[in-house]
Image: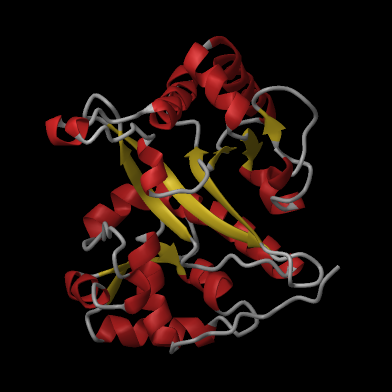
């Protein structure tokens, strides 16, 4: 097992807190502590958060039935300030700038962040590269009919190997399911990803005269189409297992999804398994066939 590498912050903690809230929209004090300063005291994070609150850059809501747990978000002033942060340049930001909006978005957003934290902790233990800015929530891409596929998150992850010289860059679209939608609707997300994988925009008249070859639209952003990973929670193991079975049925029975599955790794796991055994444990069920495995082996 490689030595655990502590985070090497490149900028002051208040700047990192603002960037993290701009990136993830809402986070509890504990999540920010685990994300940015896991080896420090909780006070090391709560003190600058309260300073930022007095400067009217962040606000918080108190989560119900949580022992007064605070969930932090950027104010309008804080959101304007973070637009100039170099780490966020060029990224679409969807800030939540009011307590009302924060309350509506909190359950799903915090669950997505819990998923990210499982990968962050695993990367630290393994010596891989995956930090708080390597997870971009709500990434959208166009589909052929003018609609969009919106992933709960896009993950960038770098396997570094035992000698720190072998580097493998991986990407994954993350779908977090809290069992708040029907199983059929969840499985239909696979159709959207299959359509994105197959979508080749038609060239306009000027491009046709130049005989420009068609290319899949996703090649604008990725050298390889990202894995598609479903993380399920919010119900019994039996219910979650049935939902994974429905995802497998979609990958087997829908012609376009079946084609996607032959080219792109697809998998599903429960959030509880990620937190208990780590994402690189044998916790992922392939949506095609085979035994459970690590997400990097799908």
Q: Residue at x 14, y 35 (%)?
A: 206
**Across the whole image, how many numbered discs are drawn on residues?**
0
Q: Residue at x 64, y 39 (%)?
A: 270
- On the image, the x and y values in percent for residue 19 come to 37, 73
| Residue found at the very far right of the displayed protein | 1
| 262 to the left or right of 186 | right
Quadrant the N terminus occupies? bottom right
Protein image colouring: secondary structure
Where, by quadrant of the figure, is residue 47 drawn? Answer: bottom left
Where, by quadrant of the figure, is residue 96 drawn? Answer: bottom left
Q: Residue at x 61, y 85 (%)?
A: 40
- On the image, the x and y values in percent for residue 102 come to 29, 56
Q: Can residue 273 be seen in the rendering of this structure?
A: no
| 174 to the left or right of 39 | left
Above or below, 199 against 105 in this view is above
| 260 to the left or right of 92 | right
Q: Residue at x 66, y 25 (%)?
A: 241
Above or below, 168 against 148 in this view is below
Q: Can residue 276 be seen in the rendering of this structure?
A: yes
Quadrant the C terminus occupies? top right
- On the image, the x and y values in percent for residue 248 come to 62, 20
- On the image, the x and y values in percent for residue 177 come to 50, 36
Above or below, 45 against 165 in this view is below
Q: Nearer the viewer, residue 222 or 156?
A: 222
| Residue found at the very far front of the displayed protein | 210
């Amino acid at each position: 097992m490689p030595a655990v590498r502590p985070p090497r912050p490149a900028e002051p903690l208040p700047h990192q807190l603002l960037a993290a809230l701009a990136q993830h929209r809402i986070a509890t004090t504990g999540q920010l502590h685990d994300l940015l300063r896991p080896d420090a005291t909780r006070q090391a994070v709560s003190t600058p958060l309260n300073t930022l609150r007095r400067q009217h850059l962040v606000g918080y809501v108190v989560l119900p039935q949580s022992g007064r747990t605070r969930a932090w978000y950027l104010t309008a002033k804080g959101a304007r300030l973070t637009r100039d942060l170099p780490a966020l340049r060029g990224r679409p930001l969807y800030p939540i700038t009011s307590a009302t909006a924060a309350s509506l978005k909190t359950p799903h957003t915090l669950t997505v962040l819990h998923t990210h934290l499982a990968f962050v902790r695993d990367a630290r233990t393994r010596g891989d590269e995956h930090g708080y800015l390597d997870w971009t929530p709500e990434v959208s891409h166009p589909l052929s009919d003018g609609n969009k596929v919106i992933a709960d998150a896009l993950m960038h992850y770098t396997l570094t190997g035992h000698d720190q010289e072998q580097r493998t860059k991986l990407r994954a679209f993350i779908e977090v399911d809290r069992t708040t939608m029907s199983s059929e609707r969840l499985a239909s997300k696979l159709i959207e990803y299959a359509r994105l994988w197959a979508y080749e925009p038609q060239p306009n008249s000027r491009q046709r005269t130049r005989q420009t070859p068609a290319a899949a639209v996703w090649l604008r952003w990725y050298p390889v189409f990202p894995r598609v990973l479903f993380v399920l929670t919010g119900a019994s193991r039996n219910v979650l297992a049935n939902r994974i079975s429905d995802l497998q049925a979609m990958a087997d029975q829908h012609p376009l999804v079946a084609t996607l599955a032959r080219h792109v790794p697809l998998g599903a796991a429960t959030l509880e398994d990620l937190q208990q055994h780590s994402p690189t444990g044998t916790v992922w069920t392939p949506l095609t066939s085979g035994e459970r495995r690590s997400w990097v082996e799908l």
